[in-house]
Every structure is written in structure tokens, then in C-alpha cells.
Image: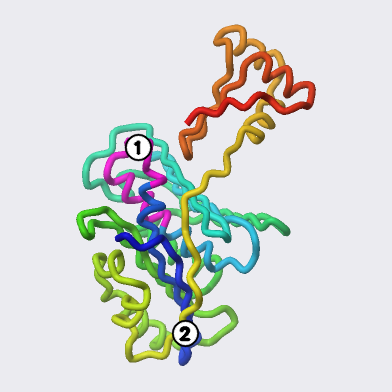
Amino acid sequence: MSQQDQMHRYLFENYAVRGELVNVSQTWHDILSGHDYPQPVQQILGELLVATSLLTATLKFDGDITVQLQGDGPLNLAVINGNNRQEMRGVARMQGEIAEGSSLKEMVGNGYLVITISPEKGERYQGVVGLEGDTLAACLEDYFMRSEQLPTRLFLRTGAADGLQGAGGILLQVLPAQDASTDDFNHLATLTETIKTEELLTLSATEVLWRLYHQEEVKVYDPQDVQFKCTCSRERCGDVLKTLPQSEVDEILAEDGEIDMHCDYCGSHYVYDAVDIAALRNGSAAGDQQVH
């Protein structure tokens, strides 16, 4: 699995159906780095990452998409955020023990799948569906049928290959405003279902697509790199501090001598002392104290 994380878009010449194929193994490892999540939580974050990358690739604008699971179970939040440049980040929050082999519903409990689309220009959109499917893929397919009326299939895979854990997946979707027969779509979905996790994680995109669709005419577009990238910064943390009541900030400084802003996504710490806070209030840049 030495190949770089990449997203490949493809189109069937004889059907009104598009596809996307992605490997996000390294990005998944980068997101998990610094966190001690139980194995089932690692897996669901891997599936969420694959799904978010695939959904981000369907966007026709500059902006980002957030896919999150919320519920009353021991895993009360799992979220992946990505943008049109395929820059991804994610985090999970737990409020109880999660047993080995826990299912999606056992982890999340009574919950929801929330998809938030935020264009850089235009209106923000949020869709919410209950977790009625047994898998994340089934819940996402349900979301597309309810909100977009677009037949969609998602194949989300995590597992071991070449002795390493990896994550990848495939999306099939009927083109908007096009008429693809149910039989044609089901035919392509049946072919896609035959992909083995190890093949998806170790073979090149060209080899995977050939194995799946060698009897079809498929147009493959130039790939797009996928990577972990956090959007936190000292400037953003400073902006947050400026929104807090001065008395609250002064109280923390008096007690601790400094304010430590921690990013859940990447683990970075941004430390502010009294001089930094004074600089923020005066409108100048605070001293550069970032600790990873």
C-alpha cells in the first residue's frame, strides 16, 4: 500500500452512471495518529473518511462537506470534514466503553447521520436522516434516495492488506437529470460488489477498474490527491479568544498563567500568555507559541 492516496473519477460511456474510486489509507492513519480510539471507532472513522472523500468529489463548487454521526450511545460523535481539494480531517468523541466488534448501532445508539455542505459562495445546506440502516453505507444510500432522489451505491472497505490497515471505497451514482434504467444500474452495482478489500487496497485504480468492468467502456479522469490537513491556526484560535468575555480570559490567566488552546483534530496546542492576550486586544499579532 505504498501508493499515494488518490481519488479517481470515471464515467460509463454506455450508461448514465458515474463512478468514483478512492484509497485513503495514509490519510486514515494520519487522522488516527495521536488518538487512542478503540478498534470499532477506528473502523467507523475509516468508513466515514472514505464516504466523505467520495461525496466531496461529487461537489461541483469550491467548498467543503462534513459527514457526522451523532447519537446517545457510547460513541456520541464521529465526524469527518473534507473540501474540494480532498483535504480531510476527523475526530471522534466517546462517553462510554465500546466493546470489540461493536456494530454501528451499538456504538451510536439512537442517532442521526448529518451531512453539511458549505460552499465558499452560496447557501449552506444541511441534511439529516435517522440511522435506520445497519451500516454507514446503507444509511448514506438512504440519504441520497430521500434528499437527492439519485440512485446511489457506496462500497466502503477497511481492513488489512500487505500487513497494514487500509481504507478505500467506490461510489456509483446515476447522473443527475439523466435516465439510467434500474437494470443497468443494478448490473454495474453487482459487478462492483465483487471487489475484494485486498484488491481495492493494493491494486492500482487502473487494475481495479479493469477487473470490475473489463467488458464495459469506461472513461477515467485524472486522479486527485487525498491528504490529511487540519485547518486550525494560531490566528483562528486568537479570533476565538477575542469573542470570549475579557473577565473570563483574565480569570484563566490569573489561575493558570496561560491559556492553552487544543485542536481535537490534529493535537496542536496554541499557548497564550498575558503578553499575547494584550497583543490580541490591541489588534497586533500574538507571539508564536505553537506546540504539537
Task: Find numbered disc 1 in the image and state the secondary structure of the residue it sits on.
Answer: loop
In the rendered image, which quarter contains the N terminus? bottom left
Magenta residues? 30-49
Q: Is residue 114 above or below residue 145?
A: above
Residue 117, image x, y percentages: 60, 57
Q: Residue at x 45, y 76 (%)?
A: 19
Q: Marks 2 and 1: which is nearer the front?
A: 2
Determine the residue located farthest toward the right in the rendered image.
282
**Location of mark 2 (residue):** 219
Residue type indicated by callout 1: Pro
**Location of mark 1 (residue):** 74
Residue 260, image x, y percentages: 54, 22
Q: Is residue 182 above or below residue 235?
A: below
Neighbourhood count class around disc 2 (C-alpha, 10 Å): few under 14, some 14–19, many 20 upward: few
Q: Give the mark nearer the N terminus: 2 vs 1.
A: 1
Residue type indicated by callout 2: Lys
Q: Nearer the viewer, residue 210 or 189?
A: 210
Q: Nearer the viewer, residue 238 or 61?
A: 238
Q: Residue at x 56, y 56 (%)?
A: 83
Q: Residue at x 24, y 53 (%)?
A: 164
